[in-house]
């Protein structure tokens, strides 16, 4: 069942994204140089350097309060930080503007809010006023984008009635419309049941295989990190250790942060 | 204006239509209520009910500060003060040091106390007490014109920026990742609310202006399932309660503002109980 769905997803992607590469070219690189954030005298993160290529999943792990979300917000340009981010096309060695997609942890939609998935989605991708009338063209486009993550039947549902997993698929679809160079996911599986998680991991794999984008994922789920991350970063104010999950798992800092549990 | 009066006199088979103040009041209601219906949708979505309440209360302080600086036009001093007050609240809110409710509460009480202190100097407060309940029957044609202008501006704003405003309300970081200027949207919306609340406070009254902003949209939410229905229901409920409240207050001899609010509240309760069973 899941398998056939997968196939469908891939077909959809090829159908809608002919002008994009079918998979990552590996020739775009994002350099995060020396990012530090401090509030008053208090340093939250310092001297974070990252080098990311398209088609790769970088996972950030660390204890609560290690500055993971702060790093994401700094990359988004939302909070004041020192350091800078470069985005380079290695094909012709030119610098480009980095387009960032973001999947948030929470959305501020209260119970009983009359906002359909269409309204939510359209708000971020078009200026055609959603309170006035449904724009047919936009509606079809959104439906197509949702279908990448098997969510097209959610389009007329109210966003506040969705389950955690459903909402997340909608947010993923919003984040890749239009396709960004860098996709940031902040603890994407919190509040999602086992089935939803598996579907989510499949979706990440789909993105990795079919889109020309790099991903940074904050995650507490080591199973996910082990299986899907190409590069793992252990963060605590600064980068304590980076490498493959196996390498990280062996290091002392990891044991100090997460204890000697069975990972 | 005279042609408008004539049209109304021909169309409306009521005895009150011969009074110009009633025709003016009706016109004002027809402009103000849909405006409040529209704005209310986002005030609720973005959880700004307390914020707009505080804005309403700040109007007294605006007048008070105006008297000190010798500004005779109370509209100008109220609007200026409300805009500064709104921007200051937004600024502090973004600094993230305290919870929003606390920030608003502290500033609102402080500001209102200053206003009351100044205005009560020499025992003159009673001359401002009509602001508390408002008096729509005293509205003049020039003031209706002003409301009509702000009505058009609001519609323009809504058509151009509604999507972005909604997106910022859902998640600021997500909006920023889509290149939406979140602070600009929040500030411009706050300024718009400040201007509209200040221009209508004399007619609606400080005590009930927020009810008029919140109730129609809250009732609309009960029965709407998307943004189009939400706006439609909210505006219709606002206009209906406005007009029926005005007429009822004429026949009962009550103040218009509270009468309108009571009707809107009744509609809220009705919609609350008839809302579709799909909401678990």
Image: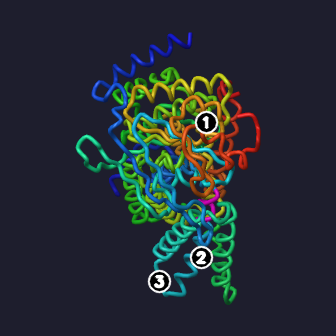
Whether B150 is among the magenta residues is no
Q: Is residue B259 visible?
A: yes
- The answer to whether marks 2 and 1 sit on the same chain is no
Which region of the structure is painted magenta?
B50-56
Residue topped by disc 2: B61
The structure residue drawn at horizontal position 45% and vertical position 29%, both measured from the top left corner, is: A207
Taking depth in this image into account, of A109 and B227 the one nearest to the observer is A109
Give the spatial CA distance, label 2 vs label 3: 13 Å
Q: Where is the N terminus of chain A found, in terms of image quarters?
A: top right
Q: Report the Cα–Cα distance between label 2 and label 1.
A: 64 Å
Can you identify the residue that label 3 sits on?
B71
Alpha carbon separation for disc pair 1 and 3: 72 Å
Front disc: 1 or 3: 1
Contact between labelled residues 3 and 1, with CB atoms less than 8 Å apart: no
Numbered circles on residues, count: 3
Residue A246 is tagged as 1
Query: Same chain, marks 2 and 3?
Result: yes
Apparent side of residue A180 relative to residue A151 in the rendered image (left or right)? left
Q: Position of residue B276 (x, y in %)?
A: 65, 26
């Amino acid at each position: 069942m899941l398998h056939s769905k997968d196939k469908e997803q891939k077909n959809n992607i090829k159908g809608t994204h002919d002008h994009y590469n079918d998979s990552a070219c590996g020739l775009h690189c994002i350099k995060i140089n020396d990012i530090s954030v401090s509030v008053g005298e208090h340093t939250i993160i310092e001297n974070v350097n990252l080098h990311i290529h398209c088609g790769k999943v970088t996972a950030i792990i660390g204890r609560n309060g290690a500055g993971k979300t702060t790093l994401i917000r700094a990359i988004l340009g939302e909070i004041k930080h020192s350091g800078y981010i470069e985005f380079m096309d290695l094909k012709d060695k030119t610098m480009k503007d980095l387009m960032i997609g973001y999947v948030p942890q929470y959305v501020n939609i209260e119970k009983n809010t009359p906002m359909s998935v269409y309204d939510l989605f359209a708000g971020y991708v078009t200026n055609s006023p959603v309170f006035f009338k449904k724009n047919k063209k936009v509606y079809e486009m959104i439906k197509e984008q949702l279908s990448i993550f098997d969510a097209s039947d959610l389009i007329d549902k109210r966003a506040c009635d969705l389950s955690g997993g459903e909402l997340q698929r909608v947010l993923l679809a919003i984040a890749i419309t239009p396709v960004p160079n860098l996709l940031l996911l902040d603890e994407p599986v919190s509040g999602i049941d086992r089935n939803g998680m598996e579907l989510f991991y499949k979706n990440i794999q789909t993105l990795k295989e079919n889109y020309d984008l790099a991903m940074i994922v904050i995650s507490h789920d080591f199973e996910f990190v082990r299986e899907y991350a190409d590069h793992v970063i252990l963060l605590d104010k600064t980068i304590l250790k980076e490498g493959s999950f196996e390498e990280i798992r062996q290091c002392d800092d990891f044991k100090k942060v997460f204890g000697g549990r069975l990972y | 204006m005279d042609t408008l009066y004539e049209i109304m006199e021909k169309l409306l088979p009521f005895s009150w239509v011969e009074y110009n103040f009633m025709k003016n009041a009706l016109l004002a209601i027809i402009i103000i209520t849909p405006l409040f219906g529209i704005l209310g949708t986002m005030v609720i979505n973005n959880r700004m009910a307390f914020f707009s309440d505080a804005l309403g209360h700040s109007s007294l302080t605006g007048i008070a500060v105006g008297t000190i600086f010798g500004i005779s036009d109370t509209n100008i001093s109220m609007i200026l003060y409300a805009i500064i007050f709104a921007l200051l609240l937004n600024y502090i809110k973004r600094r993230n040091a305290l919870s929003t409710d606390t920030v608003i509460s502290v500033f609102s009480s402080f500001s209102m106390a200053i206003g009351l202190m100044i205005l009560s100097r020499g025992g003159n407060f009673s001359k401002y007490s009509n602001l508390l309940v408002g008096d729509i029957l005293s509205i003049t044609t020039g003031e209706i014109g002003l409301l009509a202008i702000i009505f058009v501006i609001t519609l323009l704003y809504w058509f151009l920026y509604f999507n972005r405003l909604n997106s910022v309300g859902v998640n600021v970081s997500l909006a920023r990742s889509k290149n939406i200027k979140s602070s600009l949207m929040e500030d411009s919306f706050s300024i718009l609310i400040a201007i509209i609340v200040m221009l209508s406070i004399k007619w609606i009254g400080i005590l009930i202006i927020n009810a008029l902003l919140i109730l129609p949209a809250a009732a609309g939410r009960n029965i709407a399932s998307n943004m189009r229905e939400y706006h439609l229901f909210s505006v219709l409920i606002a206009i209906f309660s406005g007009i029926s409240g005005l007429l009822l207050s004429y026949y009962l001899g009550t103040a218009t503002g509270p009468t309108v609010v009571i009707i809107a509240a009744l509609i809220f309760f009705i919609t609350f109980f008839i809302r579709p069973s799909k909401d678990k």
